[in-house]
Image (cartoon, grey):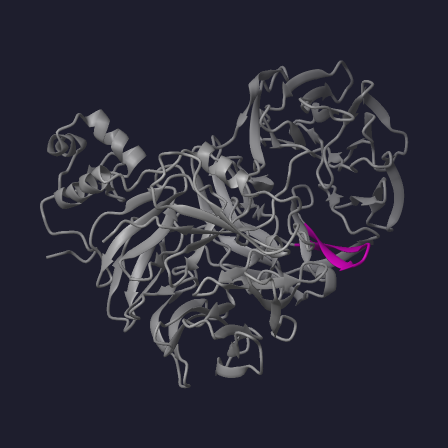
Amino acid sequence: MEDKSGHPQEPPLESWKEIAAYLKRDVRTVIRWEKAEGLPVHRQMHQARGSVFAYARELDAWKASRELRLDKAPPPTAWRRAAEAAGLVVAVLLALGTAGGGPFVAPLRAASGDEGPGTVLRQLKFPGLEATPFAQLSPDGKRMLCVRYREGGRPSALAALDLSSGQEETLVDGSAAGWTFGSEGFLFRWSPDGTQVVYTHRGHELRVVGSHGGEPRLLWSHPDPNVIVKPQDWARDGRFILAAVVDETARTTRLVLVPTEGGEPRVVVSCNRGEIDDWARLSPDGRFVAGLRTEGGKSHVCVWASDGEQETPVTEPGTRVSPGFWSPDGAYLVFTSDRMKTQDLWAVPMRDGRPRGPALRIKQDLGRNAVLTGFTAAGQLTMIVTGEGTPTNLFVLDVDRSTGEARGELTPYAKYPTGHFSPRWSPDGSRLAYTSRKGQVQKPNLFVGSLDGESEEEISANGYYAGNVEWSPDGTSLLFPGFIPPDGQAGIFRVPLDSRRIVPLHLGERLGRGYEGAFVNLQWLAVAKRFTFDKLAGPDKLEIYTMDADGRQVERVAEAPTSYWTWPSPDAQHVAYRQGQELRLLTLADEASKPLATFPEGTDVSGPAWSPDGRAIAVSDTRRVQVLSPVVSAPRTLVEAPAGSAIGGTSFWSGLAWSPDGRLIAFLQREMPAKTGSRSEIWLVPVAGGTPRRAAVAPASHPLLSDVTWHPGGTRIFTTGGTGEGQVRAGYQHWVMEGFLPAR
């Protein structure tokens, strides 16, 4: 007998001591096994952290698998050496050109002798493949579907590529199908025999086209054109297509089976938006569907019977877990998870839609930038890797509030690299919010971390494309500018932290060419008590808007001749913006503009910093730090850069920041031109004048600092660290893995 979670009905071992006694080891050893080798220990999620239990049958199965060495994997350094040997990193992210010669399928065995004897990694390479994250290997492994892009990043076509000859055939015109940036990743699938392709047309239709092109046929159309239908999988017998039906108006997601010979879909599962993922897979026999269920912000792999009568959790909630993929024989569900603090490849043995044993760790540390995409009929596991480059990270420096002296060195804010965009503090300074992809091939999600960086919560953007994030003035919600794929309608959206249901506050128009109409740069202005944001209105043209806290009053207040960022004053009276190599100041009352600083040709135009009350602005032209009043033209110089050094941040960001009490300005300084081993520095200078003091040097791992901000309490400085201009940026790499599953 089993309980509803698939666990055997037997008395559990209810403490580390009991588990250790059963395994005839000491407590320290079994805790180490649980952390390092996947010992199947469960935790009561509603009780204290130390409340653990285990089942004897699962421990026995784990012992047997451990003896067979099924979870052995090369260390991360070996994986990276092997990846580099096959050309994992290419020169330019999203480059639309080629990556060298003709078609290439590179066999690759791991560089470590610890790898299982049958495991093979192969990278698929041919011109242009590195430019797209959206590609699918055919069931026979001989052809690949991939999205091609036109200039500006918009999808232009779905193409089928022959891996042996390099011949390419266009199957679907992306514009005619209504694909927009960010929507195309889930919108096509191969048939089991590789002769047909199902794809989404205009968001709400499923169409089928031959794998060599031809006239497509309509399979099914949702009556509401605003509903998005995403094909997920094709039944092995060809009779049904599994699809996700996403209704943003009703806030629901349904997984349905659509008959390929016509007729209405049959619902497998229906939930509120965000409770299940719109990525799912059919078991080879068509009886079960594997997907992700999310409860209380924590996700787990789940299996539903295709008749809707059974739901079985496969993994425990709480870890960062990928959707599950069925092995071709249905004997395993394969997924990635970071339950052991690295993103590892796991496999759960399955029978009749239920786990028949504990999860086996197949390969350790795939990297947080590896994304599984499916299986071929021969058992090749396909994945996308976005490169092995060092992600940006957030660093913190403690500062004595009374003396302005730095305490210690820059240290990472959180345990894992943040890869963040535009972090913002909550009004009370207790939480930090930002958007990030976390190295994954996905739209950015929202993250909220504690002041000390020890805890972090991921909030799904639920299919929306989120730009920067900002707090509501009461600290109960997050807001972001973004758009809704696939139609690309721009808007400002609110996410209450209790319900996490995304609510539009202000909707704009559909995005045009070059993302015209998009809203960007949402900020809360504490003195004016209003939000401000920019609208991309055309080449070198931004419209500037203000909005009240409830989103009810939105007013266009000015226009700036720039396509870059703007920096509004806290009192909403002025806006700084970039035009060419100049930083200029726009007065909103009369739209009069004047120069603030002129940057040398070939250097980054970094942003200014406003004083907390909005009455003064600090600027740098790389050569000095100056402070001036918006209504008085004469600047006052605080700091002159030493010879061979430059002051300021990088493009879009400010390398200057006022302390919350207005007494100090923090600024970045770096060696110019940069030399091998050189690192950015953080300096502090009194606003009233005085000798500047060096506060910190960038870590060797992240030598280039791009921006600097103060914590609202004035006792900490935060900065973003990167690897510098010499870092190689990676495109999308497509891999297959073979011979890794244990024999049944």
Query: Residue 315's x, y, as percent?
Result: 29, 50
Answer whether residue 700 is visible to the viewer in this image: yes
Q: Answer left or right for 721 relative to 594.
A: left
Answer whether residue 178 is visible to the viewer in this image: no
The residue lying furthest to the front in this view is: 165
Q: Answer left or right for 610 relative to 529.
A: right
User: Which is nearer the eye, 594 or 169?
Assistant: 169
Query: Residue 418's x, y, as percent?
Result: 53, 38
The N terminus - image quarter: bottom left
Q: Is residue 526 above or below residue 259?
A: above
Please name the predominant secondary structure of the magenta segment in the image: strand
User: Which residue occupies 23% across, 38% down?
Assistant: 66
Residue 256, by quadrant, is: bottom left
Q: Does the magenta stretch include residue 533?
A: yes
Residue 390, by quadrant, is: top right
- How many marks can you see? 0
Query: Residue 479's x, y, as percent?
Result: 57, 52
Residue extent of the magenta highlight: 532-547
Q: Is residue 700 above or below residue 369?
A: above
Q: Answer left or right for 594 relative to 439.
A: right
Q: Is residue 69 magenta?
A: no
